[in-house]
C-alpha cells in the first residue's frame, strides 16, 4: 500500500510542476506555439534518448541489484538480528519486504522511463500545447519515481556499509583478543 502512496505522491509532484509551467506560460503571456516549438526542437529528442537509455539500463541491472543486495544486506546476520528486534515491537513484518519494495520501485522506474520515452516519440510529435504538457508530465513522473528508487537504494547501501563496519569491528576485536591471549 505504501508503494501506491509514493507513486501517487510522485504523480502529484509532477502534476504540480506541469500546472506551474502552464501558469507561468499564462502569467508571462508566452505564446503556447513557441513553447511547443521550443520543446520539439530542444527538449523532446534529449528526453526520448535519455529516458529510453535509463529505462534499458535499469532493466538490465534490476536483477543484479536485487540479488546483490539480498546477498549482502538481507542475508546478513546483523539484518536478521535487527529484524527480530523490530518484529518484537511490531507484528506482521515481512523479512524481505524492503527488498521487495525496492524491486517494485525499480520495476515502476523502468516502466515509467520507457513509457515516458514512448510518449516523447508519440504525443511529443503533435503540434499541440496540451500534448506537450502531457509528454513533459510523463517525463517528470519518471524522474520523480527514479529519485525515490535512488533513495531506496541509498537506504539499502547504508545498511550494507553499517553491516560491513560491524563485521570489521568484530574482526578487530577478535584479533585483539587473540593477541591478548598470546
Image (cartoon, rainbow, N blue to C red):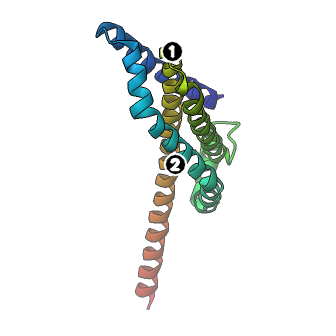
Q: Along the line of sight, which residue is nearer the eye, 20 or 8?
A: 20
Q: Which residue is mark 1?
A: 130
Image quadrant for the N terminus? top right
The residue depicted at 64 percent of the width and 42 percent of the height is 107
Please identify the quarter of the rendering in which residue 63 is found: bottom right
Image position, residue 36 (x, y; %): 43, 21
Image position, residue 53 (x, y; %): 54, 48
Q: Along the line of sight, which residue is nearer the eye, 93 or 45?
A: 45
Q: Which residue is mark 2?
A: 153
> Helix or strand or loop: what does disc 2 sit on?
helix
**Extreme left residue here?**
28
**Rendered position, 36 above or below 45:** above
Residue 110 appearing in the image = yes
> What is the number of callouts on the image?
2
Please identify the quarter of the rendering in which residue 6 is found: top right
Q: Is residue 176 left or right of residue 2?
A: left
Image quadrant for the C terminus? bottom left
Q: Using the numbered discs, state the Cα–Cα distance from disc 2 to disc 1 in whole angstroms.
A: 35 Å
Q: Residues within 10 Å of mark 1 (few under 14, many from 20)?
A: some
Image position, residue 167 (x, y; %): 50, 68
The residue depicted at 48 percent of the width and 26 percent of the height is 136
Q: Is residue 107 left or right of residue 36?
A: right
Amino acid at each position: 500500500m505504501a508503494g501506491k502512496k509514493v507513486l501517487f505522491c510522485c504523480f502529484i509532484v509532477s502534476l504540480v510542476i506541469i500546472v506551474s509551467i502552464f501558469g507561468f506560460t499564462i502569467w508571462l503571456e508566452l505564446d503556447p506555439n513557441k513553447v511547443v516549438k521550443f520543446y520539439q526542437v530542444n527538449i523532446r529528442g534529449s528526453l526520448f534518448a535519455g529516458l529510453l537509455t535509463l529505462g534499458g539500463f535499469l532493466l538490465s541491472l534490476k536483477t543484479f541489484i536485487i540479488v546483490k543486495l539480498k546477498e549482502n544486506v538481507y542475508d546478513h546476520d546483523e539484518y536478521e538480528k535487527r529484524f527480530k528486534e523490530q518484529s518484537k515491537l511490531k507484528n506482521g513484518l515481512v523479512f524481505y519486504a524492503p527488498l521487495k519494495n525496492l524491486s517494485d520501485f525499480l520495476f515502476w522506474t523502468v516502466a515509467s522511463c520507457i513509457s515516458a520515452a514512448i510518449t516523447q516519440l508519440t504525443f511529443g510529435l503533435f503540434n499541440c500545447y496540451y500534448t506537450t504538457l502531457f509528454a513533459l508530465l510523463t517525463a517528470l513522473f519518471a524522474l520523480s519515481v527514479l529519485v525515490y528508487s535512488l533513495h531506496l537504494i541509498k537506504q539499502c547501501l547504508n545498511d550494507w556499509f553499517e553491516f560491513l563496519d560491524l563485521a570489521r569491528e568484530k574482526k578487530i576485536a577478535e584479533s585483539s583478543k587473540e593477541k591478548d591471549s598470546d
